[in-house]
Amino acid sequence: MPQKRPDRTLGGPHDAFWDWCARGELRLQTCTSCGHRTWPPVEACEACGSGGLDWERMSGRGRIASWCTFERDYYQGTLPLPYDTILVELEEGPLFLSNPAGFTRQEIEIGMPVALTFVDAEDSAGPFRLPVFAKG
C-alpha cells in the first residue's frame, strides 16, 4: 500500500526527476558547461547560467549532514506525527532532503552512512516512487 505524502512539485524539470525515480534511479542535473550539480531541478545552471543540463545518475550513497523531527501537523494529517527528515550529503556532493527508512531519530548520528532506497507513495497527483535513505 502506497504511503500518503504531501504533494510533490511537478512541471518542468521536476517531471524528469520523478520519471527517473519511477525507474528506480536517483538522477540530478549536471551542467554540461561547468560540471556543477544542481538540486532541486532548475531550467539553467545556478553556477554559470548555461541551459545545458544532463541528468547524471547518483550512486545513492551518502552521509547524514543534519536531521529534524517535526511535531506539528504542517500537512493536514498526511504524515503521522512526529515525522523525521534527514539532510543527506550525497557522495557526489549535493545535499538532498529526505526521510529515513528503517531507522528513527534515536538512531541518527551526524556522519552516519546511508544508502538510497525507494518507497511507493501517493499524493493528489497519483502514485510515485519516493527516494529515501536506509542505514548504509
Image (spheres, helix red, strand yellow):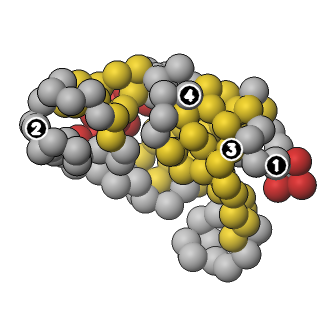
Q: Give the CA separation, mark 4 to mark 2.
A: 24 Å
Give the residue at x 67% y 28%.
Answer: 115
The disc at residue 119 is none
Please tell me whether mark 3 sits on a helix, a strand or a loop.
strand
Q: Is disc 3 in contact with disc 1, using a CB cutoff of under 8 Å?
A: yes
x and y percentages locating residue 5 in the rendered image: 55, 56
Q: Which residue is labeled 2 in the image? A: 50
| First in sequence: mark 3 vs mark 1 | 3
Report the amino acid beneath label 1: Ile
Residue 5 visible to the viewer: yes
Give the residue at x 41% y 46%.
Answer: 126
Report the amino acid beneath label 4: Glu
Q: Which residue is labeled 4 in the image? A: 91
Q: Give the CA separation, mark 1 to mark 2.
A: 38 Å
| First in sequence: mark 4 vs mark 2 | 2
| First in sequence: mark 1 vs mark 2 | 2
Q: Is residue 60 above or below residue 70?
A: above
In the displayed orientation, state which residue is furthest to the right.
106
Q: Is residue 16 left or right of residue 114?
A: left
Q: Which residue is labeled 3 in the image? A: 64
Give the residue at x 18% y 24%.
Answer: 32
Report the amino acid beneath label 3: Ile
